[in-house]
Amino acid sequence: MIAPEQVARALERIDPRDRELLALSLRRRVPDEALALVYDIQAPEVARRRAAAIERLAEELGVHRGADLGTVLKALLEEETWSGTGAELGSEFGEHEAPKADPEPPNAEPEPPPPPPRTPETVWASGEEPPRRVPHLALALVGLGLAALGAGLGLIAINGLGGDGQAAGGGADSGDGTRIFLPAREGPAAAPFPSDPDDASCYPRAHASGRTTLYEKPGGKVLERVPGRTEWGTPRVFGVIDREGDWLAVQAPELDNQTIAWMRAEAGRIDCVRWSLHADLSKRALYVRRDGHTERSFAIGIGRRGNPTPEGRFSVTDKLRVTDDDSPYGCCVIALTGHQTRLPASWPGGDRLAVHASPDLASIGRPASLGCMRVRTGEARWLIERVPVGAPVFVSS
């Protein structure tokens, strides 16, 4: 049996964005249509994210049995559970202040299971991504929760924005002083608040259609003309940093660290990736994120004193499997756009940065390399299978 205080403690351990969505949906009982406006997504995507958040909460609690799943859902609808988290919605969750829902009508019908999720919108994408499957556990949680709670509590009625709740112009007043935020689609008003890039969940990339000309600035001097494949034969994919009209700011290994070049948007197919790597050199740790959530973290070997790992933003260019059993790079290499600029004068090799495996397990977690980041073999294989070419890599200390 899961006690409400256990659920409260688990809520404090999950990602704040998951906790925010559950609080708005289940504590404040905000309609999905209103949340869709707040988060700038479709209402079915709200349902998908809620189901995924419930799944992560269940994993935190170690819940697998149907009766316990129903108890968790019931606890999420009770005020004392949220009071036990020690945080008030609004002070903790920052800019996503949501409108209050209309009062639940008497004898409300149980909420139907969430509809199948639509494909998430991509950033500057020319086409839609394949739809992602909702995890079976998340669907089971929703189904079991609805069945368990429908009989005893009368579930949340998901209503559309009604009465004075419509959004217009600068947003509608919800009655408690908050307003629905509807940013402009382009121009300075499109992103009025500075945002931490670590919070992004989809990073744009451009698949080259062939040889690509890179410019110093839109319409400016030519910097490089790069082939449609990398030096290791991988189809060229650029990590996209910015966009101005028909021009994309991109990274490429032919450029110096942190040098951004511009290419015509029509010269590539644009989509986005939901994976990103975040290396913290001070902690000697690599955090792998998907959809803005940390999937796994690894201890890493980093550059030694005198040959430190360069900091900044880079992009994945190649995923390489090593066939030489005696290679110092272990089984696998994830090559990056970056370069090591502080190599020993006697170093005979190249200067490209990478995340790679290493047969020297004692070096993991220590400053022992010439700049590359080293991980264990199993972790390198896991990264190779999941992290796509074009994904961003953020290195900081």
Image (spheres, rainbow, N blue to C red):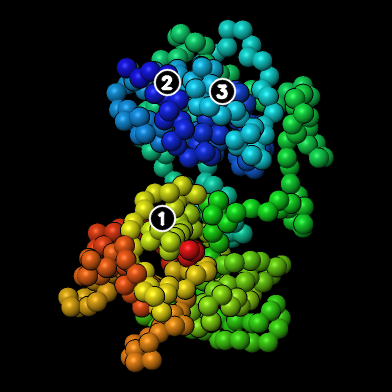
Among the 4 quarters of the image, the one containing residue 373: bottom left
- On the rendered structure, is 126 left or right of 59? right
Among the 4 quarters of the image, the one containing residue 148: top left
Which residue carries the number 1 mark? Answer: 288
Q: Quadrant of the N terminus?
A: top left
Q: Secondary structure at mark 2?
A: helix
Amino acid marked by disc 1: Val
Identity of the residue drawn at 49% across and 10% down: 153
Amino acid marked by disc 3: Arg
Which residue carries the number 2 mark? Answer: 5
Q: Residues within 10 Å of mark 1 (few under 14, many from 20)?
A: many
Amino acid marked by disc 2: Glu
Separation of marks 1 and 2 at Cα, in angstroms: 30 Å
Which residue carries the number 3 mark? Answer: 27
User: Which residue is farthest front?
Assistant: 305
Q: Please state the horizontal and vertical placement of residue 180, each as a whole percent of the image.
A: 73, 35
Q: Are marks 3 and 2 in contact (CB under 8 Å)?
A: no
